[in-house]
Image (cartoon, rainbow, N blue to C red):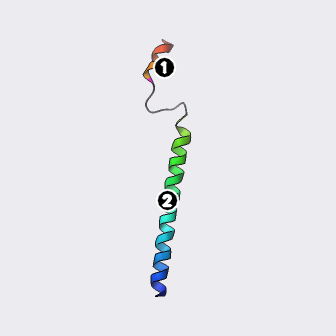
């Protein structure tokens, strides 16, 4: 019984760590979305400069 509880708590801990990491990655992507180093540059803005 004790081993089962330990395994369930361990599994829950691993899931919390994975979800926390995913949340951090999505937060980082949301913050870097407005940066100047975008992967897909807007073509209209680059055409206006020329």
User: Is disc 1 surrounded by few (<14), some (14 to 19) or many (20+) residues within 10 Å?
Assistant: few
Relative to 14, say whether 20 is above or below. above
* Point 49% across, 70% down: residue: 12
Q: Are marks 2 and 1 in contact (CB under 8 Å)?
A: no
Which segment did they paint magenta? 35-42
Relative to 40, say whether 48 is above or below. above
In what element is the residue under mark 2? helix
Return the residue nearer the eye: 16 or 50: 16
Question: Closer to the N terminus: mark 2 or mark 1?
Answer: 2
User: Is disc 2 surrounded by few (<14), some (14 to 19) or many (20+) residues within 10 Å?
Assistant: few
Q: Would you name the residue on which mark 2 appears?
A: 19
* Residue 31 shown in magenta: no
* Point 54% across, 52% down: residue: 24
> Residue 4: where, in percent of width, then height?
45, 83
* Point 56% across, 41% down: residue: 31
Query: How many labels sit on residues?
Result: 2
C-alpha separation, residue under disc 2 versus residue under disc 1: 37 Å
Q: Is residue 1 left or right of residue 34?
A: left
> Residue 3: where, in percent of width, then height?
46, 84
Relative to 31, say whether 41 is above or below. above
Return the residue nearer the eye: 12 or 40: 12
Dominant secondary structure, magenta: loop
Where residue 23 is drawn, which disc sits there? Answer: none
Where residue 45 is drawn, which disc sits there? Answer: 1
* Residue 38 shown in magenta: yes
In what element is the residue under mark 1? helix
> Residue 38: where, in percent of width, then height?
48, 32
* Residue 44 quadrant: top left
Relative to 48, say whether 13 is above or below. below
* Point 43% across, 21% down: residue: 43
> Residue 48: where, in percent of width, then height?
49, 14
């Amino acid at each position: 019984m004790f081993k089962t509880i330990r395994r369930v708590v361990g599994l829950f801990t691993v899931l919390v760590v994975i979800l926390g990491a995913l949340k951090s990655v999505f937060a980082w992507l949301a913050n870097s979305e407005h940066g100047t180093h975008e992967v897909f540059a807007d073509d209209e803005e680059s055409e206006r400069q020329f």
